[in-house]
Image (cartoon, grey):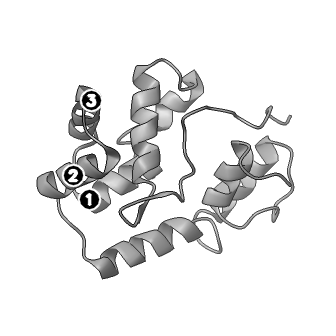
């Protein structure tokens, strides 16, 4: 049975949007803020934060920061996304331009001919779309959240 879509969540940006050249980080901040405001769907809770294999976890692992610490810092308020990214660099690691290029390439292509393909196809089926409708998880997310139509 197909789940209803699109999942419209005002204030949640695309995973491919960048903060200082880094994909996904801004979306993670949006999810933190939306959750604190009670505007993130309840069924999203299991994948928030440090869940192994989840994109939040991957991003925190890449930056070598603790999700809970980032969440606490973000919820203090008063900092831009760019300032929070600088905080992450100062409290974890600051990747080189080449490392950011590799990160972005991996994340933008996740689900395309890799270990994420099966999950991508499962997610497509959940919303009633056939396998191959899109090639990556980021494309799926943008369809599922109504940014792109098919």
Quarter the N terminus occupies:
top right
- In this view, the mark in front (2 or 3): 3
Residue at the spot x=46%, y=36% of the render? Answer: 31
Say which element carries label 2: helix
Q: Distance between the residues labelled 3 and 1?
A: 21 Å
Residue at the spot x=77%, y=42% of the render? Answer: 126
Residue at the spot x=39%, y=33% of the render? Answer: 32
Up-down: is 54 above or below 63?
above
Instruction: Give the image quarter of residue 150.
Output: bottom right
Circles 2 and 1: CB distance less than 8 Å?
Answer: yes
**What is the x, y in percent for residue 68?**
25, 35
**What is the x, y in percent for residue 64?**
22, 57
- In this view, the mark in front (3 or 1): 3
Q: Mark 2 points at which residue?
A: 88
Up-down: is 118 above or below 54?
below
Residue at the spot x=19%, y=58% of the render? Answer: 89
Q: Residue 63 carries which label?
A: 1
Judge from the rendering whether residue 4 lies leftward or rightward of residue 10; answer left or right.
Answer: right
Q: Name the residue under label 3.
A: 77
Q: How far apart are marks 2 and 3 (CA)?
A: 15 Å
Q: Which mark is residue 28?
A: none
Q: Which of marks 2 and 3 is nearer the N terminus?
A: 3
Q: How crowded is mark 1: few (under 14 residues within 10 Å), some or many (20 or more)?
A: some
Circles 3 and 1: CB distance less than 8 Å?
Answer: no
């Amino acid at each position: 049975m197909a789940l209803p879509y699109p999942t419209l969540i005002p204030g949640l940006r695309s995973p491919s949007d960048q903060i200082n050249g880094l994909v996904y980080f801004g979306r993670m901040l949006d999810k933190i803020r939306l959750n604190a405001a009670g505007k993130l769907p309840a069924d999203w809770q299991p994948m928030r934060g440090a869940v192994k294999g989840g994109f939040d976890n991957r991003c925190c692992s890449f930056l070598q920061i603790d999700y809970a610490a980032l969440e606490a810092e973000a919820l203090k308020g008063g900092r831009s996304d760019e300032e929070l990214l600088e905080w992450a660099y100062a409290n974890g690691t600051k990747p080189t331009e080449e490392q950011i290029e590799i990160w972005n390439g991996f994340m933008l292509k996740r689900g395309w001919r890799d270990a994420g393909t099966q999950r991508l196809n499962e997610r497509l089926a959940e919303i009633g779309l056939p396998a191959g409708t899109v090639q990556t998880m980021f494309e799926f997310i943008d369809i599922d959240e109504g940014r792109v139509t098919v």
